[in-house]
Amino acid sequence: MDIVREYRCPHDGKLLFKGILIDSIIEIKCKQCHEIIVFQGAPQASLLCAKAHCPHRVHC
Ligand SMILES: [Zn+2]
């Protein structure tokens, strides 16, 4: 399963980076409109929940 997300500028839709953020905060400057965008990662517990067969998951 591909869980890598695309993170895009909310102003012009430019793709800024791809990745997985877990309990993280990223600041990145859009090279197109020069706005600084802040992305917040998903809480670790919610990602664990998404892994259907992970033995370490804590929810449902
Ligand atoms: Zn932009």
Image (spheres, rainbow, N blue to C red):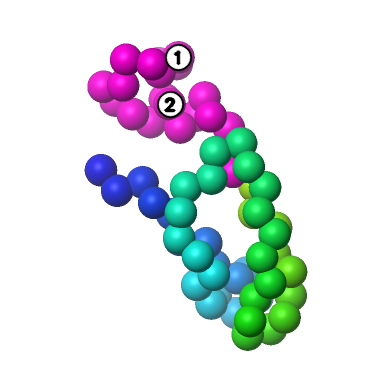
The quarter of the picture where the N terminus appears is top left
- Dot 1 beta carbon under 8 Å from ligand 1: no
- Vertically, is 2 above or below 33? above
The residue closer to the viewer here, 16 or 52, is 16
Question: What main secondary structure does the magenta stretch of the protein show?
Answer: loop
* Three-letter residue code for mark 2: Leu
Q: Which residue is under mark 1?
A: 58
Q: Is residue 32 visible?
A: yes
Query: Marks 1 and 2, how far apart in space?
Result: 7 Å
Q: Residue 32: image x %, image y %? A: 63, 85
Q: Which residues are magenta?
A: 41-60
The residue closer to the viewer here, 29 or 10, is 29
> Is residue 13 left or right of 60 when viewed as pictured?
right
Q: Residue at x 45, y 14 (%)?
A: 58
* Three-letter residue code for mark 1: Val
Q: Which residue is under mark 2?
A: 48
- Vertically, is 13 above or below 38? below
- Dot 2 beta carbon under 8 Å from ligand 1: no
Q: Residue 59: image x %, image y %? A: 45, 16
